[in-house]
Image (spheres, rainbow, N blue to C red):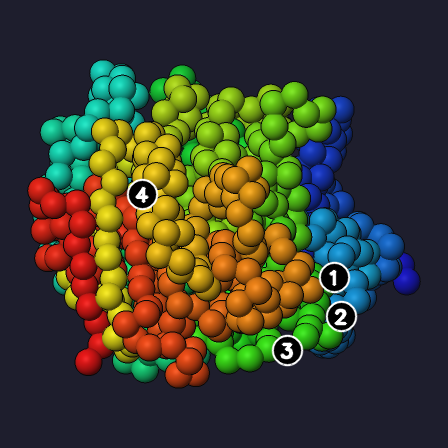
Amino acid sequence: MGKPRKQDFKRKRPQIDLGSLSKKQRKIYRTEKKTKLQGNRSNKDAVEKDHPQKVPEQDIESEEGISSSSSEDEASPYQQLVSTLITPRPAHNTHRDSDESDSEDEETENLENNQQEADREQMSDDDDDDNDDDVVDRSDEEVESVNSDGEAEMIGLDDLSGDDDDVAENGEEEGGVGEGGESSGEEMGMEEEESDQDEDTALHDTDPFLKHFEIELEENVADKLGACPKCQREQVQIAGVGPALQQWPLPELKPTVLPRKDKNLTDAHVRQSLCSNLAEANRKMCNVTSGGLSSFQSGMFSIINNYQDLLYSDRNAETGEKIRLLYCLHALNHVLKTRKRVISHNTKIKQKGQLSVDEDYRDQGLTRPKVLMVLPFRDSAKRVVDMFIQLLNPTDQGFVSNKKRFQSEYSLPAQEEPKKGYKPHDYETTFAGNIDDHFRIGIGVAKKTLKLYTKFYMSDIILASPLGLRTLIGAEGDKERDYDFLSSIELLIIDQADVLMMQNWDHVLHIMRHLHLQPLEAHGVDFSRVRMWTLNGWARFYRQTLVFSGVPVPEVAALFNKHCHNRSGKYQIMRKPTCGSICQIAAQLPQVFHRVESTSITSVPDDRFDFFVKKVFPQHSKSGASQTLIFVPSYFDFVRLRNYFKREEISFLQISEYSKEKTVNTARNLFYHRRLPYLLYTERFHFYKRMRIRGIRHLIFYGLPQYPHFYSEMCNMLGDVRGKARADSLSVTIVYSKFDAQRLAEIVGNVRAGQMINSQKSVHMFVTGD
């Protein structure tokens, strides 16, 4: 074909329907066309500079393909951008060739064909799980490959301002738009800037996200918080949840308004994309058919959405999934809001080019990860990811990278052996699915995109078990250790804390000690975008911590009080008064409670051991009691008692969480047939196995169990003697101290526990059964 004529470029092009184009096509168009426009402008400036008198303005316009004849009829940047779109580019060529066709029908047909091809390509990518491992970091390669195939796309004016999925935090490129790129049109940039400024001003008084993270503490207030003052407390009523203990660190930081339930989550500033999928996700994952959040969920979310710390110690099989949905919703809402703010600031910076001294766009931390979820098992992580998918895009049209790999690694293994014997309902609920406790996974989140297995420093959310993080963080002196990714965590979620206690609570404390430490490397951070309170070392005052547990545990409460210093305060949901698990004992048993006198909590282990070896155990030995099971909650106490029995040459059996199956079966058989009189039995083994020990005639609780229903379970085992022993020959002995008041209340009830702790008598007896 010949050289295109000048009048061909001046001819008005037809408007093409933009709604039929996919998001992926719009992204490709935005990147490629902005680059082309920059090149056209640069060519024009170079020609005018070299030949100011010899090159007419019309010739330059003809060479560039831009319709512009005079200042009165000058095309807007958007019109210039659209004028470069009509003729599709040939493959492996980033600029228009001179022999392109001018036919409007052919252009429209080519555009439609390319659009269908791109849609098929995108559907194929979504279904191709075999190539999932290459997806996370290939977004830029996809842009280049599609552009090289000559796909031409049209985009509307509303799409030029940038999408939530276009720019990753800290200037990382995603979908073709990255830090340092040019804004998409001057007029749209001005409109977006004004609207963002108005939005920020309006939301500062209403949006909890902006109120919490954008208001900086005064230096004297931060110094007071750093001194860890004793929190002031007040009991309040949370609608749908019940009584709660509200705490705030300083008088000037006391919340002026109690959390309120918003029936419409958009009024609570939850992203509309999440609100639209919430009802279906709640129905499918939590069996809530009310069309939104239940009354309990609304009350809980009113606290969570205000970025206040929360300790909830009444998690069970009924409320577990409802709580999981809430913190997944909150985590996604937080990440998407942060992402939108970064994109908005990126756009403003690109439009202005150079910022003045007074202008400051600080919206990031020292590293990218913002949300850390500490979970006990791989199945828990799988449930969280499933929640994410349901909330982001339940129709499976969203792109989830590495989904096939994730399903294979976090689902229940195909050759898993079935559990033997009858197990209680709470056991079946806790240990459903994959119960591997060594895992960690990074997740990147966009508007409707979930990237699994991203590197931690490229992730928005991290899901990990305490053991998985401990092996990565390491200990002091290790050659290879990494904990910089914990420096800017803004939302910490610890779910099923009671289960974590049965794993290794020291791992959780180790993680808490490595939060918000100064990174050893920069990791490519732009310090001009880092929030000032992060640079000042005040990040721990802005971190929100959510802790959920099935039972009240003193160690969990200590973590909540010692390591949580949220400037917005915190709430501790109070458990409802209970009559105790002692009411669930069916057998007629005399139960004797011995109170050990201790002056401090640190002396309790020694005082309890002395009391046991000097008073409790000699009484059983003198009476000739046989078939005595000693229930030991702590493994450290178990080792201490085991060494004592060996040192005193007392015949005994032992079952712990480290015992092999053969050893366990042998011990159970010998104990049932009265071959050996004593059996040391740990609570952690009972938690993981829940075996029924037959032949028990005397039961000694060396300490109160963490789970109150374990007390009734063990006591009911005494009735399984097949009528070979009279009821009056059975006995239960319990050793406790005043520091066990919380566990005691769960066993005997709140009223009786108070009387026993404050009584001058140290021995109390209860008789259950008919």
Which image quarter holds the N terminus? bottom right
Q: Which of the two discs, 3 and 4, sits closer to the camera?
A: 4
Spatial separation of the CA atoms under disc 3 and disc 2: 33 Å
Q: Which of the two discs, 2 and 4, sits closer to the camera?
A: 4
Residue 51 visible from this viewpoint: yes
Question: Which residue appears at 71% of the width and 39% of the height?
Answer: 39
Tell me which label, 3 or 4, sits earlier in the chain: 3
Give the label on residue 128, or none: 2
Spatial separation of the CA atoms under disc 2 and disc 4: 69 Å
Within-10-Å neighbours for mark 2: few <14, some 14–19, many 20+: some
Within-10-Å neighbours for mark 1: few <14, some 14–19, many 20+: many
Within-10-Å neighbours for mark 4: few <14, some 14–19, many 20+: few
Marks 2,1: beta carbons within 8 A? yes
Amino acid under label 3?
Pro
Q: Label 3: which residue?
A: 418
Could you say where residue 474 lies in the image, as x and y percent from the top left?
63, 32
**Left or right: 249, with 153 as reference point:** left
Give the label on residue 543, or none: none
Spatial separation of the CA atoms under disc 4 and disc 1: 64 Å
Q: In which quarter of the view is residue 434 placed?
A: bottom right
Q: Secondary structure at mark 2?
A: loop
Give the label on residue 132, or none: 1
Q: Label 4: which residue?
A: 615
The vertical placement of 622 against 361, above or below, is below
Could you say where residue 769 lies in the image, as x and y percent from the top left?
22, 77
